Amino acid sequence: MPRKTLRDILSRVFHLDTPIFLEVAMKRHSLLVGVIVLTLGATLLDAQGRGRGQGAGQGQAVNNNNSGMPWEALRAAVMIPWEGVPFTAQKTEPFKVFDNISYVGIETVGSYVINTSGGLILIDSTYAETADHVLDGVRKLGFDPSNIKYMLITHQHNDHFGGAARIKQQVPGARVGASLEDWDAIEKGTMIARDLVIKDGDTLKLGDTTLKFYVLPGHTVGNLATEIQARGNGKSYRTLVGLAFAPAPGMTAASITSTERLEQLGPWDALLTSHSYLAPVAIPLTAQQILLSGAPDATRKPTGHPAAVGPERINAYFDQILKATRDRLAREQARPPQ
């Protein structure tokens, strides 16, 4: 199935022809235009997607768990072009995010490799069908996959643990880690015997790098985030890797508590989320930002690194998530008993 263009998406959502000035803008700023227009159509997209999804990150274009969340429009812009496209067609070239953290995932699902003086740490494995792509990405970055010492799974959804068995087969010496709360589902889904059980507040040291773990119920009961000192431009940045926010059914209150805790644990310099569309992007965008791609984001202060959006923007993003999640909880509590 050919990949849909943004023009196709706009026609499908709004059932109208794109004005010529927007078409010119699309050629140069397709993602930005998609985000701002899809912000206007988020309700329509959610209505079209009801009943289709398997859960966040399962290859579906839209999902009720994301409804009303600050990333909803960006998620649509990222996911709709890949609707119906095989996971193996969603490959993207690996790239360095920080000096010690690189992206080796696919377009719709994140996977990160951390290089330390003692070996490599892989965070998430993507799908079973794309596990080899993750390993190829490690190689393209100049690393040897056999040096993967740990493979850490952020949570019990197939798009994050599905490739673990294949990677473990290729790198039998790698230890597999996950939260106690999510290990049952991961163990059944991967057929990998339970290995490293990670508890809230645990740390892991490999070579010159120390990781700290937080168990943050909400997206799943054992959703795991990893703290690391990312390095770039001669500086260190306090960074969280592997975050997912969309509350699972029945876990809205837990999600609020976890997001409040994350904000209290700050300040954070960077968030490397388990899906690219969960990143703290300033939305809605202004007309100037759409039409002039180099226009600065007025909500951000310079941090010395493009991936480090800074504590001010991250705290504002947490506040956006909290407002949306509290609104959802209020709606849930107002529903009459079934």
Image (spheres, rainbow, N blue to C red):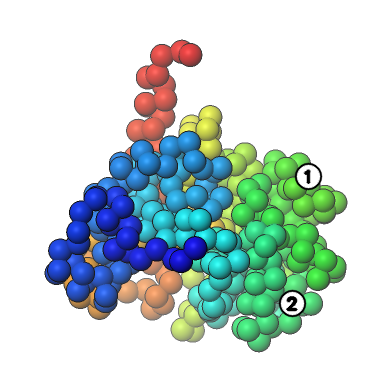
Residue at position x 41%, y 29% from top?
A: 329
Do residues under tags 1 and 2 come within 8 Å of each other at their CB atoms? no
| 301 to 329, vertically: above or below | below
Is residue 330 visible in the rendered image? The answer is: yes
| 334 lies left or right of 231 | left
Give the mark nearest the N terminus, 1 or 2: 2
Which sits in the foreground, 242 or 84?
Answer: 84
Q: Position of residue 194 (x, y in %)?
A: 82, 50
Cα–Cα span, label 1 and label 2: 25 Å
Percent coordinates x, y for residue 23 in the rendering: 21, 69
User: Residue 188 — which label?
Assistant: 1
Q: Residue at x 79, y 77 (%)?
A: 146
The mark closer to the camera, 1 or 2, is 1
Left or right for 183, reference 273: right
Mark 2 is on which residue type? Pro
Helix, strand, or loop for circle 2? helix
Q: Which is more toward the observer, 237 or 61?
A: 61
Residue 337 screen position, x and y as percent: 46, 13
Which residue: 46% across, 84% down?
233
- Residue 145's disc is 2
Packing grade of label 1 (10 A; few <14, some 14-19, many >=20) is few
Tell which residue pokes out farthest to the top in this image: 337
Which of the 4 image quarters holds residue 33? Answer: bottom left
